[in-house]
Image: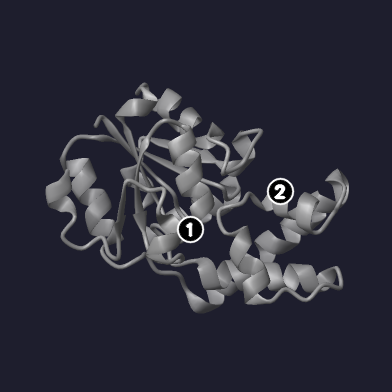
């Protein structure tokens, strides 16, 4: 293993509730009620794909919707704060201490990614950042992880992806990478395609 590629939302950052509330308000602006069961399958998808395929908006209207969603998300985080997943910071620090290359590959847009990483203190840990608006195809396509590996200068087979969502696990495996899944948003049986499934980042340092 030469590198570890982390997902962000739900994997390192406890942002699922804030993301749901931001989407709920955005959907309401278009006359649609978004329940949590309706939101759950959207986890791991790019915001642009949600705007075009779920809200059925054209490119111009989708851009407006994404700005609304970003503004709502920022407002919620400023009001309520945001936390890392328990023991995530320790695990990322342990990866860094083992002198492995580290990337972040998130379906979130670049502005949200940097906003969240700065507020949680995670930004300095990563050698490479890849956001969802930099690739043509979002998860479960492998594009984002392959781009991360290329920027790191590492072959896909030498990468371990850390994910929490089904779409992310599928993307990692389609990229030809190993995958460690954590059950922060999905149950273990839903993450069965991962090579290893854990309930917590605690005590994971020895596997490195």
For the C terminus, the quadrant is top left
Nearer the observer: mark 1 or 2; the answer is 2
Answer left or right for 3 relative to 51: left
- Height in image: 100 above or below 63? above
Question: Which label belongs to residue 49?
Answer: 2
Q: Nearer the viewer, residue 150 or 127?
A: 150
Q: Nearer the viewer, residue 26 or 195?
A: 195
Q: Image quarter for residue 154?
A: top left
Answer left or right for 91 relative to 37: left
- Height in image: 175 above or below 203? above
Answer left or right for 66 relative to 9: right
Q: How far across and down, in percent of the image, does residue 88 sit?
A: 30, 59
- Height in image: 176 above or below 10? above
Precedes in sequence: disc 1 or disc 2: 1
Query: Is residue 188 visible from the viewing direction of this image?
Result: yes
Residue plotted at (23% across, 50% down): 93
Q: Nearer the viewer, residue 190 or 67?
A: 190
* Residue located beneath label 1 in the image: 9
Residue plotted at (27% across, 64% down): 200
Q: Are the residues tagged 1 and 2 within 8 Å (C-beta)?
A: no
Residue plotted at (61% across, 51% down): 45
Q: How far across and down, in percent of the image, does residue 55 sit?
A: 81, 59
Q: Dot 1: what SS?
A: loop
Question: Which label belongs to residue 91?
Answer: none
């Amino acid at each position: 293993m030469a590198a570890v590629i982390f997902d962000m939302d739900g994997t390192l950052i406890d942002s699922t509730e804030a993301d749901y509330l931001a989407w709920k308000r955005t959907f309401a602006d278009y006359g649609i009620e978004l329940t949590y069961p309706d939101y759950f399958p959207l986890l791991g998808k790019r915001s642009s794909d949600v705007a075009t395929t779920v809200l059925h908006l054209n490119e111009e209207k989708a851009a407006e919707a994404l700005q609304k969603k970003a503004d709502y998300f920022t407002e919620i985080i400023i009001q309520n704060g945001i936390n890392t997943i328990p023991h995530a910071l320790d695990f990322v620090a342990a990866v860094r201490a083992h002198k492995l290359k580290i990337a972040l590959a998130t379906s979130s847009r670049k502005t949200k990614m940097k906003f969240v990483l700065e507020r949680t203190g995670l930004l300095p840990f990563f050698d490479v950042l890849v956001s969802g608006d930099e690739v043509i195809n979002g998860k479960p396509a492998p594009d984002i992880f392959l781009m991360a590996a290329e920027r790191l200068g590492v072959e896909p087979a030498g990468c371990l992806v850390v994910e929490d969502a089904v779409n992310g696990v599928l993307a990692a495996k389609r990229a030809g990478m190993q995958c460690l899944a954590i059950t922060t948003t999905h149950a273990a049986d839903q993450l069965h395609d991962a090579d290893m499934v854990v309930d917590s980042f605690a005590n994971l340092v020895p596997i490195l």
